[in-house]
Image (cartoon, helix red, strand yellow):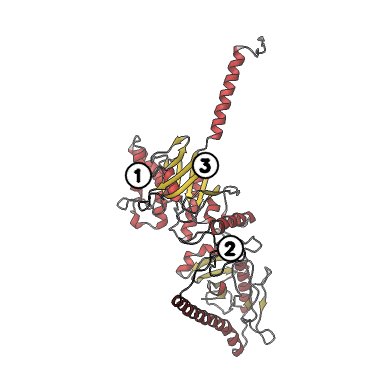
């Protein structure tokens, strides 16, 4: 056995060991403290040709650190300098003061380590999808053979699902396909940082959600660092690790840096059922619409704003406090700095008075029309003979109640509305008809009525989004005897565009589910935005 003698604390060997350990510790400390992307005290100022003493300050003292592999979403009002900040990161425009560094190296010009995907795709219209991607690959990988370059292009076309459309030019592609080409072109160069400037802003809701899912798959596979501008809070909550919120311009800066706690991989429906989702969503909305509400030019910033409550699609969640437009005609006793109303000339006062009278008359006409429409079903019920139609309303409990019209139970009128369901944002009572449809396998009216009630209650209790449509959405829905939705088809353009805002995709039985011998019935489901939002379910077309 060798003779192992302890090291002398004063010996050269011991001193060398200490030096090595100290150097290693210093390297680890430097690596831990150095972020992947560092934005430090960045400001962007443009000269004012009309008044050189008052330059245009776009960004003022922006500080942000992003770790490698993070997915960051940047949100804020239009004109707050989001794109200006991304241009500094991409190297298109240098900051007036401050520093942007990637892996410790200051960014002074564009480079292949940072690729940008724009909202307008930025594809060359005379080149095919394959050639647009190949142009970027051969520019960055000029040292590779033509075969290797072609293989990279082919792999990335397959990655975004465009192998079959590789020979088509941008004019022959849909908006979603163009954006897939732009994403594939950016990823084909294997950048260290992917910069997305509202990449899905011009797409319809269905394509938008599909590309969000594709982007997450690509990001999880390649672990690329992503910084993305978006105005969609739900999109930011679904995609990002952190949401960075910017204050209003001019002289914008970072207002909040909000961490998103949901684990990955993410399921859209599951995270939207999490109460934390609505807490974060409300916080972002409160930041945008209250703390940093967008003011038009010339508004007095000292005017106190009136607080209003925005409803959420699911009951039991905390309301959103937003800022309404201030009423400056009369100073508030609680706002010592409120703006005082300026004197109004007689001519201006007369014009305002006439405008007010015309507006009141129009509102009265609209209200009378609405009341007349609400009373029409009641009048028809009084004159028409009793029919076996079941009237389904939204009760405060999940189980729907069927009420058969009779002398003892008159039809609901505007004076006595049924209580609205808390599960649907601004939902109202929904009449239903049980006429026999030629396309249904079930002819028994009582059974059709029961299935109809079950379908209505199922849709009514399954809302996960705040409706934003302004036109009626109508769908043809096929339902089993047990209430399972096996198929639905939009019957108008608005229904196709806004299908993801309805619960129908969530409620549909997954493809490939085992078939059974249950009969089916077809119903027409209509989501009407008028009168506060009406949901109607009836058989047939």
User: Which of the 4 image quadrants contains residue 281?
Assistant: bottom right
Q: Please report whichever mark, 2 or 3, sits nearer to the chain's N-terminal start.
A: 3
Quadrant that contains the N terminus: top right
Q: Is residue 507 left or right of residue 471?
A: right
Total marks shown come to: 3
Q: Is residue 103 visible?
A: yes
Q: Nearer the viewer, mark 1 or mark 2?
A: 1
SS assignment at label 3:
strand
The circle drawn on residue 471 is none
Q: What residue is pinned by disc 3?
A: 66
Query: Could you tell me how far apart the alpha carbons at marks 2 and 3 are, in whole angstroms?
Result: 39 Å
Q: What residue is pinned by disc 2?
A: 507
Q: Please report whichever mark, 3 or 1, sits nearer to the chain's N-terminal start.
A: 3
SS assignment at label 2:
helix
Rendering coords of residue 69 (x, y %): 52, 41
The circle drawn on residue 134 is 1
Residue situated in front as seen by the camera: 437 or 408? 408
Query: Could you tell me how far apart the alpha carbons at marks 3 and 1 are, in whole angstroms?
Result: 30 Å
**Residue 513, above or below 403:** above
Residue situated in front as seen by the camera: 81 or 346? 346
Label 2: few (<14), some (14–19) or many (≥20) C-alpha neighbours in 10 Å: some
Q: Nearer the viewer, mark 3 or mark 1?
A: 3
Rendering coords of residue 261 (x, y %): 61, 48
Marks 1 and 2 in Cβ contact (< 8 Å): no
């Amino acid at each position: 056995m060798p003779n192992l003698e302890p090291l002398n604390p004063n010996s050269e060997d011991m001193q060398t060991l200490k030096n090595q350990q100290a150097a290693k510790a210093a390297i680890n400390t430097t690596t831990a403290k150095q972020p992947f992307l560092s934005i430090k005290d960045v400001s962007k100022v443009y000269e004012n040709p009309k008044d050189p003493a008052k330059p245009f300050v776009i960004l003022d003292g922006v500080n942000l650190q992003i770790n490698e592999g993070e997915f960051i979403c940047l949100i804020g009002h239009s004109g707050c300098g989001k794109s200006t900040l991304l241009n500094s990161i991409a190297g298109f425009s240098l900051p007036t003061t401050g520093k942007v560094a990637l892996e410790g190296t200051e960014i002074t010009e564009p480079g292949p380590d940072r690729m940008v995907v724009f909202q307008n795709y930025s594809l060359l219209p005379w080149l095919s999808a394959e050639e647009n991607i190949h142009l970027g690959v051969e520019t960055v990988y000029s040292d590779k053979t033509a075969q290797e370059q072609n293989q990279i292009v082919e792999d990335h076309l397959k990655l975004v699902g465009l192998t079959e459309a590789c020979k088509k030019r941008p004019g022959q592609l849909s908006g979603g396909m163009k954006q897939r080409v732009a994403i594939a072109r950016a990823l084909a160069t294997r950048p260290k940082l992917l910069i997305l400037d509202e990449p899905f802003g011009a797409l319809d809701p269905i394509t938008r959600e599909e590309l969000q899912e594709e982007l997450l798959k690509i990001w999880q596979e390649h672990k690329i660092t992503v910084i993305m501008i978006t105005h969609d809070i739900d999109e930011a909550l679904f995609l990002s690790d952190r949401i960075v919120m910017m204050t209003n311009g001019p002289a914008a800066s970072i207002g909040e840096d909000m961490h998103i706690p949901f684990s990955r991989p993410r399921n859209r429906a599951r995270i939207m059922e999490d109460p934390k989702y609505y807490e974060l969503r409300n916080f972002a909305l409160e930041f945008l619409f209250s703390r940093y509400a967008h003011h038009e030019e010339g508004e007095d910033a000292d005017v106190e704003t009136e607080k209003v409550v925005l409803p959420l699609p699911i009951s039991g969640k905390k309301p959103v406090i937003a800022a309404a437009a201030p009423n400056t005609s009369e100073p508030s006793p609680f706002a010592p700095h409120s703006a005082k109303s300026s004197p109004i000339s007689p001519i201006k006062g007369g014009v305002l008075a006439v405008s007010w009278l015309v507006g009141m008359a129009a509102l009265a006409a609209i209200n009378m029309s609405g009341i007349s429409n609400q009373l029409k079903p009641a009048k028809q019920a009084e004159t028409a003979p009793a029919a076996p139609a079941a009237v389904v309303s939204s009760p405060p409990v999940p189980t729907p109640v069927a009420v058969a019209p009779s002398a003892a139970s008159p039809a609901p009128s505007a004076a006595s509305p049924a209580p609205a369901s808390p599960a649907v944002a601004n939902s109202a009572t929904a009449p239903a008809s049980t006429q026999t449809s030629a396309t249904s396998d079930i002819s028994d009216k009582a059974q059709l009525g029961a299935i109809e009630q079950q379908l209505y209650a199922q849709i009514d209790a399954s809302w996960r989004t705040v409706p934003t449509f302004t036109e009626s959405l109508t769908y043809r829905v096929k339902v089993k005897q047990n209430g399972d939705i096996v198929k639905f088809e939009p019957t108008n353009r608005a229904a196709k565009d806004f299908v993801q805002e309805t619960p129908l995709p969530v409620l549909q039985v997954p493809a490939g589910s085992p078939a059974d011998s249950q009969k089916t019935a077809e119903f027409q489901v209509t989501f009407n935005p008028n009168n506060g939002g009406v949901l109607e379910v009836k058989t047939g077309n």
